[in-house]
Image: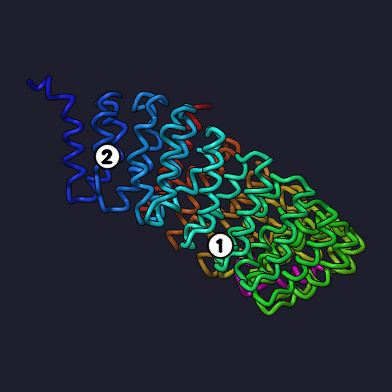
Amino acid sequence: MAMVDEPLYPIAVLIDELKNEDIQLRLNSIRRLSTIARALGEERTRKELIPFLSENNDDDDEVLLAMAEELGVFVPYVGGFEHANVLLPPLETLCTVEETCVRDKAVESLCRIGAQMREQDLVDSFIPLVKRLAAGEWFTARVSSCGLFHIAYPSAPEALKTELRTIYSQLCQDDMPMVRRAAATNLGKFAATVEAAHMKTDIMSMFEDLTQDDQDSVRLLAVEGCAALGKLLDPQDCVTHILPVIVNFSQDKSWRVRYMVANQLYELCEAVGPESTRTDLVPAYVRLLRDNEAEVRIAAAGKVTKFCRILSPELAIQHILPCVKELSSDSSQHVRSALASVIMGMAPVLGKDATIEQLLPIFLSLLKDEFPDVRLNIISKLDQVNQVIGIDLLSQSLLPAIVELAEDRHWRVRLAIIEYIPLLASQLGVGFFDDKLGALCMQWLNDKVYSIRDAAANNVKRLAEEFGSEWAMQHIIPQVLDMISNPHYLYRMTILHAISLLAPVMGSEITRSKLLPVVVTASKDRVPNIKFNVAKVLQSLIPIVDQSVVEKMIRPCLVELSEDPDVDVRFFASQALQAIDQVMMSS
């Protein structure tokens, strides 16, 4: 009897758990649908499991979301694409629920299933589903239907195609703004499947309706449609139909719409071609850069380099640069920050002379900005300017500002400068570096902030790699080793960290004669944190020095530490001793 009942067991458990009051149990059973479907087999899944799910009226959004997701990958479990239509009813129900994320997931799953269905099944099952949703009494169904047209349309016969275009046009004029928003969002996808003959008539008239909508939330989604439709039309039609809309939108009374135009303008330039960009879109972009709403200026400022790349340097200098100068002293720190993150990219576009004359003063003013993010954004892109104006000019004009920022009160700015130093060092060369920046690198090892000290230790190592061990022996090692006697144990720890990083770069001989004695002396420190860090450093030095040095200097020191009263010191010392033994065994 048990054998007979066994196939029924999974579905019985599922039904029990789906009706359980505990949401976690209900969720678990939904997430195990594929396992249960495999246990039931394809036929019983189609005849029992899917109808059960269609009738399941769970009211918890999390459970419904999981169900919508699971059903999207269910085609193999119901017998492949020829039976895919049985999955449509439960998903159709989910397309009408109130929670947006459930509907979106159900639409995504329907699209996935629709893409695998046979053409005849799409006509018989999928298209009627889209029509039912589009005619739904409740707005949620109509919203969901908008995302399905691009799957339904290509397989439809001619008469049905005309009907689908008419229905979509009605959705674009729906009473509910939410439906019009969904229609605007999906118009680009739908348009990509529509034949060129109907593109200019039907689709463009829908687009015009949406661009003149009284709700700004619909118009701003129509802006996104501009770029999508622009790619589908040839340049001449694009100039005729899309360009006037963009120009109007750039002066829209709602700042949200203007914000979307500022974000999308670069893509739109590619669609309309260089001629129209020069005559119509440059004035529109200048208006957005000077917009009275800070959010719009932020979006426009963030695209300034991309926009300049499509223009000739002369046009950029004539029209865009005056706006950039204004933005560099904008009242909003976020506008200045957005500008600082991209302005360096303008240097290669404008060329050397214009960069020196026009951009350098702007860089300098942004480097001295009171807001740390603005300064950070400039520092992180300095190499782009260096490639254009050369190191001599960079060092004369920008280096004083960099030195000033090296002592900035915001540690993140100091950190950005440190990370930039090795690059600067390689470009400035040894002589210049020693004069101007050498002292700063040592100063950072004693910074109040741990992240700065850590970065400074890494920086010292990278400089030793850049300029070689002889230079490091003269300019870095003596100063670093002097700091081991700092009265504060945290700074002494930084020096130990720096030694462990420098040793592989400096090589065996210098490590033995200069670095190792300092570490051994530090093992007598009174602070346990220093002592267990000594044990860690000694372990890292084992592969660098000769075996005789390990036995003569490192092992005795570690043996002493392994008998320390502090448990952590003993632990790390014994770990290092084990490492020595392993090296001995392998050799």
Pick out the residue farthest to the right.
353
**Residue 578 screen position, x and y as percent:** 43, 38
Q: Position of residue 122 (x, y in %)?
A: 46, 32
Whole-percent x and y of residue 229?
67, 49
The three-letter code of the residue at mark 2 reads Leu
Q: Predominant secondary structure in magenta?
A: helix
Q: Hey, what amino acid is under mark 1?
A: Val
Q: Secondary structure at mark 2?
A: helix
Residue 379 seen in this snapshot: yes
User: Quick check: 413 above or below 185?
Assistant: below
For label 1, the residue is: 218
- Left or right placement of residue 25 versus residue 487 in this view: left
- In the rendered structure, the answer to whether residue 358 lies left or right of residue 266 reads right
Magenta residues (range): 398-415
Quadrant of the rendered image containing residue 550: top right
Indicate the quadrant where residue 529 lies. bottom left
Report which residue position mark 2 lands on.
53
Which badge, 2 or 1, comes first in the chain's sequence? 2
Is residue 441 something one can see in this rendering?
no
On screen, residue 52 versus residue 506, left or right, reads left
Mark number, residue 334? none
Q: What residue is drawn where x is 34% and y is 27%?
A: 78
Magenta segment: does it hold 453?
Answer: no
Q: Nearer the viewer, residue 148 or 475?
A: 148
Q: Residue at x 51, y 48 (%)?
A: 167
Residue at figure coordinates x 18%, y 25% from the top left: 7
